[in-house]
Image (cartoon, helix red, strand yellow):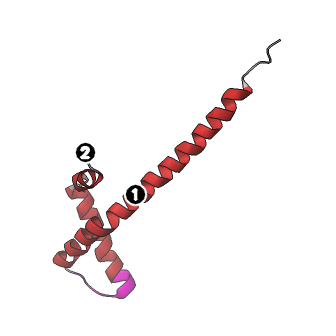
Amino acid sequence: MKKKEILQQIKLSNSQKEKLNAEIKAFYLDERGEEIGIIEQMQLLELFERKMAPIIYNKALDDAKSWFSRMMDNLDSDYYTLYREED
């Protein structure tokens, strides 16, 4: 399966969308003093899903790979500290 196909399968649940729409609405009200309608909320959320989600997803993958690589380096050094000298 191609990377793009995997990303297209990642969808937010309805409850997640509702929560994020409420966050968008609160942000606009708190930060800009503006009311934002449900259509605008949905459009912004769709934009974020389409444009920002893949970037954040890829960053999370890169971070996980970096962490895993560091752990494997530690495992390698820990492994060799267990070696005993041979006569």
Q: Position of residue 62 (x, y in %)?
A: 47, 54
Determine crowd level at label 1: few under 14, some 14-19, many 20+ residues with C-alpha closer than 10 A: few
Q: Position of residue 28 (x, y in %)?
A: 32, 81
Magenta-drawn segment: 29-36
Q: Tag on residue 58? A: 1
- The residue sitting at the left extreme is 39
Q: Position of residue 3 (x, y in %)?
A: 30, 52
Q: Tell me what residue is drawn at x 20 percent, y 78 percent.
A: 40
Q: Which of 8/33 is in front?
A: 8
Alpha-carbon span between mark 2 and mark 1: 16 Å
Q: Which of 12/10 is in front?
A: 10
Sequence-wise, which precedes: disc 2 or disc 1? Answer: 2
Residue placed under numbered mark 2 in the picture: 1
Position of 45 relative to 37 (above/below): above
Q: Position of residue 79 (x, y in %)?
A: 66, 28
Image quarter of the N terminus: top left
Position of 66 relative to 23 (above/below): above
Give the quarter of the image for residue 57: bottom left
Give the quarter of the image for residue 78: top right
Position of 35 relative to 42 (above/below): below
- The residue sitting at the top extreme is 87
Q: Disc 1 marks which amino acid?
A: Asn
Whether the residues at callouts 2 and 1 have beta carbons within 8 Å, the answer is no
- Secondary element at tag 2: loop
Q: Nearer the viewer, mark 2 or mark 1?
A: 2
- Secondary element at tag 1: helix
